[in-house]
Amino acid sequence: MRSNRLMVTTMALAMAGSLSITACSSQKEAARQAADQLANTATATGQAALAPAVTPVIDLLRKGESEVKGGNIMAAVATMGGFKALWAKAAPVIQPLAGDKWSAINGAANTVLSTFDKGATPDAAAAGSAITGLIGPLSALIGQ
């Protein structure tokens, strides 16, 4: 009789432990899903906040790129003359939201600035490389 009670008690404890582990596992999974959803929302919110700052920069870069590809370096230099002022407004918005990508973005922006500095006459390869070097990371930042 005592061994039956012991066996029933042992089985009851084993089942309770199993249910507890299952519940704990379910809670962990729910917490993980909530964290993933929060991260996705934060990413979408960050991208939405970045778009108004990044889009005009990308538009200017694409116009300059088109002019370079069309063989009109002087038009590209004139277009990119507006980059410095535009970047001065966009960079403070982009930097805190870019995270670990900021260093590469800032480096590429500095390359654009030095390539199209006042009085500069870059060759097509340098101009195109500088422009595409910044279009890529900025586009990736806003999910384009």
Image (cartoon, rainbow, N blue to C red):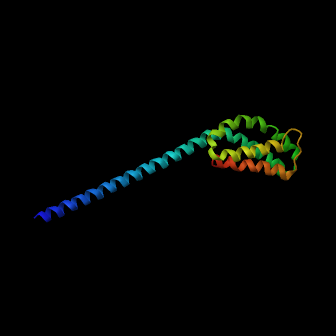
Query: Which residue is depicted at the point 78% across and 39% down?
Result: 83
Residue 17, given in percent of the width and then of the height, sits at 28, 57
Q: Tell which of 80 and 39 is nearer to you.
A: 39
Q: Tell which of 3 and 28 is nearer to you.
A: 3
Quadrant of the image occupied by residue 10: bottom left
Residue 120, given in percent of the width and then of the height, sits at 88, 42
Q: Give the total of numbered labels.
A: 0
Direction from residue 126 to residue 37 in the image, left or right: left
Q: Tell which of 75 and 141 is nearer to you.
A: 141
Q: Tell which of 105 and 66 is nearer to you.
A: 105
Direction from residue 94 to residue 118 in the image, left or right: right
Query: Which residue is depicted at the point 45% across and 50% down?
Result: 33
Residue 27, given in percent of the width and then of the height, sits at 37, 51
Check the picture and name the quadrant holding the N terminus.
Answer: bottom left
Query: Which residue is depicted at the point 14% across and 65% down?
Result: 3
Q: Is residue 5 above or below residue 56?
A: below
Quadrant of the image occupied by residue 79: top right
Query: Which residue is depicted at the point 65% across and 47% down?
Result: 101
Residue 5, given in percent of the width and then of the height, sits at 14, 61
